[in-house]
Image (tube, rainbow, N blue to C red):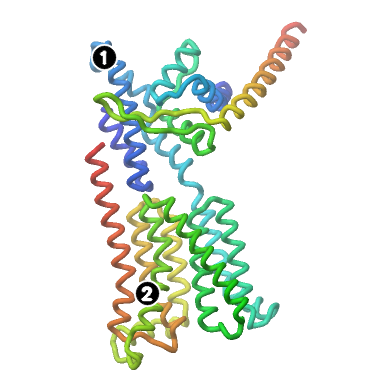
Amino acid sequence: MSKLQQLRKGSTPLLLLSILATDKMYGYQIMRELEKRSEGYFTMTAALLYPALHQLEAEGLVKSEWQEGQGRRRRKYYTITPKGRKALTSSQTEWETFLVNLQKTLKLSTNT
Amino acid sequence: MTPEEYLRIFGEELKGFSPEEQASLMEEIGSHIESHKEDLRTVKDPEERRNKMMSELGSPREMGKRFKMIYRPDRFVDFLFVAIPYLLYPFANILLQKLVGADSVVRAEVILYSILILIGLWRQSILVTVFWITMIIGQIISMLLVGYAFYGSVQSILWLAFAIGLLFLVGQIVWQNRNDLLTVVFACLPLLLCVYGSTFVLIQPQNAGSLSGFLDRFLLDVYMKSGGYFYYLGHILAIALFFLATNRDLRWLALAMLGLIEAASRSYLNLSHELLSPWVYSLYAFIPLAVVLLGWWVERNKRKQMVMAA
């Protein structure tokens, strides 16, 4: 796995929580929303998305409920919990600090 | 690969899960595939449509492995928390006799087992917690039945209250996991044996304690010739299979072995002065097998229904 892929993988919980912070969604909807918001930069296969969602649920950061669809299969909707919102805020701060410092360091190295 | 093949492979990866867990995961992924299909209606070429969908689904085996990592915490570590204290038991018993005296050994053991229950609760391991709770309850019951006069009424009431508290905890665990029949049977089997075993001893005819039956003599023979190792090693082997096997049918088999070993041995360990008559004994040994078989059959049917629904 490349370093960039590792970084992307590490950001998966943050990405999912940030999407669910706006509204409750089902898996496929989350996948499309992620693609739309990042203009295709972040894509996630179902094989990665669903275990990640279940992991967040096991940690109490999101909760899920089944809802009947009209004439179709039921869908499992995920909602962010108050604990998830807290985790999102703290993750956002951590990532922003990381990115600011990374950019600073990169600028310094290109200027010298 | 077609969506149906995808779901089939994914289902194969979930064999260690209970039918309810499997059904829920299969339904969620099935629902995802359906949403994807609806979304791809505008793509006219069916081949292109399928390829696009399959590439966005990712590997079904990979997905199954990831789910296993989330829902199947390391059962090997859980097994160690059961096997190591169990294997050290004879040595610990001798040590405790020297340290606290023979009269207080049982109480010291109960305290040690309580620590293991706390470890089980801390690890959120149902199996470790339930295993040691059932061991303690058995110990407390025999302690109170045999040594009521020795412990006195105040201490006996406290021990009884402790046992009831533990029973309540087992009840809560069983209720929370009522959809996982394998766990429910694992939790209830020793308690069931203890309850109906004691009842059988109390209600059987007074003169029934004979060694006339072939089965009775055979089991006593096995126990005497193995020097008690039949129960000790058989128990640990069955537990190893139950904790470490990933195949659910094998785990049911391990549970049947465990029930049989418990039934075949415990009466000679705990009820040595009140042997059961052969036919009562046969019933005593048969009930755990019947319970396990029933549990396995119900779960198998549920699994079949789930596959049909998917």
Relative side of A11 to B219, left or right: right
Q: Which residue is mark 1?
A: B41
Q: Which residue is mark 2?
A: B196
State which quadrant residue B280 falls in: bottom left
Vertical position of residue B60 compared to residue B303: above or below: above
Vertical position of residue B225 compared to residue A76: above or below: below
Provide the chain ID for the residue under circle 2: B
Q: How many marks?
A: 2
State which quadrant residue B33 falls in: top left
Q: Quadrant of the N terminus of chain B?
A: top left
Q: Mark 2: which amino acid?
A: Tyr
State which quadrant residue B261 falls in: bottom left
Cβ atoms under marks 1 and 2 closer than 8 Å: no
Provide the chain ID for the residue under circle 1: B
Vertical position of residue B132 compared to residue B100: above or below: above
Q: As rendered, which of A8 and A19 lies closer to the eye? A: A19
Q: Position of residue B260 (x, y in %)?
A: 36, 71
Query: Which of label 1 and label 2 is nearer to you?
Result: 2
Q: Mark 1: which amino acid?
A: Arg
Q: Quadrant of the C terminus of chain B?
A: top left
Q: As rendered, which of B86 and B150 lies closer to the eye? A: B150
